[in-house]
Amino acid sequence: MKNPISISTHGYLILFGKWTKLNLKDTVWERMIEFYLDTKYDIKRILSIK
């Protein structure tokens, strides 16, 4: 079961990350968002391997 709130937040962060890549390159926010997204994908990959 997935939490709908976390799914919408994740989608929002993806959109925000794309926006920052277009408008605010090489910012701390962009790096934080990319790190957050990369970590989330890694966690999903690890869980899917189980």
Image (tube, helix red, strand yellow):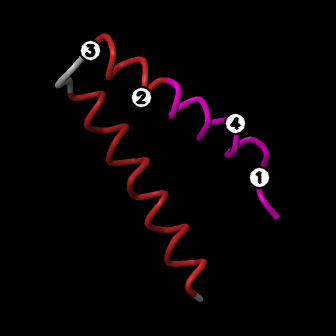
**Mark 4 / mark 3, whichever is N-terminal:** 4
Q: Nearer the viewer, mark 4 or mark 2?
A: 2
Looking at the rendered structure, the kind of residue marked 3 is Leu
**Mark 4 / mark 2, whichever is N-terminal:** 4
Looking at the rendered structure, the kind of residue marked 2 is Gly
**Would you call the spot at circle 4 few (<14 residues within 10 Å), some (14-19), or many (20 or more)?**
few
In this rendering, position of residue 40 left or right of residue 31? right
**Mark 1 / mark 3, whichever is N-terminal:** 1
The CA distance from mark 4 to mark 3 is: 23 Å
The CA distance from mark 1 to mark 4 is: 9 Å
**Mark 3 / mark 2, whichever is N-terminal:** 2
Disc 3: which residue? 24
Disc 2: which residue? 17
Quick one: which residue is furthest to the left in this view? Answer: 26
Quick one: which residue is furthest to the bottom in this view? Answer: 50
Q: What is the x, y in percent for residue 23?
A: 31, 10
Q: Which residues are magenta?
A: 1-15
Looking at the rendered structure, the kind of residue marked 4 is Ser
Disc tally is 4
**Would you call the spot at circle 1 few (<14 residues within 10 Å), some (14-19), or many (20 or more)?**
few
**Mark 1 / mark 4, whichever is N-terminal:** 1
Disc 4: which residue? 8
Q: Are marks 2 and 1 in contact (CB under 8 Å)?
A: no
In this rendering, position of residue 21 left or right of residue 48? left
The CA distance from mark 4 to mark 2 is: 14 Å
Does residue 9 belong to the magenta stretch?
yes
Q: Write the residue at 21% across / 29% down.
A: 28
Quick one: which residue is furthest to the front in this view? Answer: 22
The CA distance from mark 2 to mark 1 is: 21 Å
Which quadrant is home to the C terminus?
bottom right
Disc 1: which residue? 3
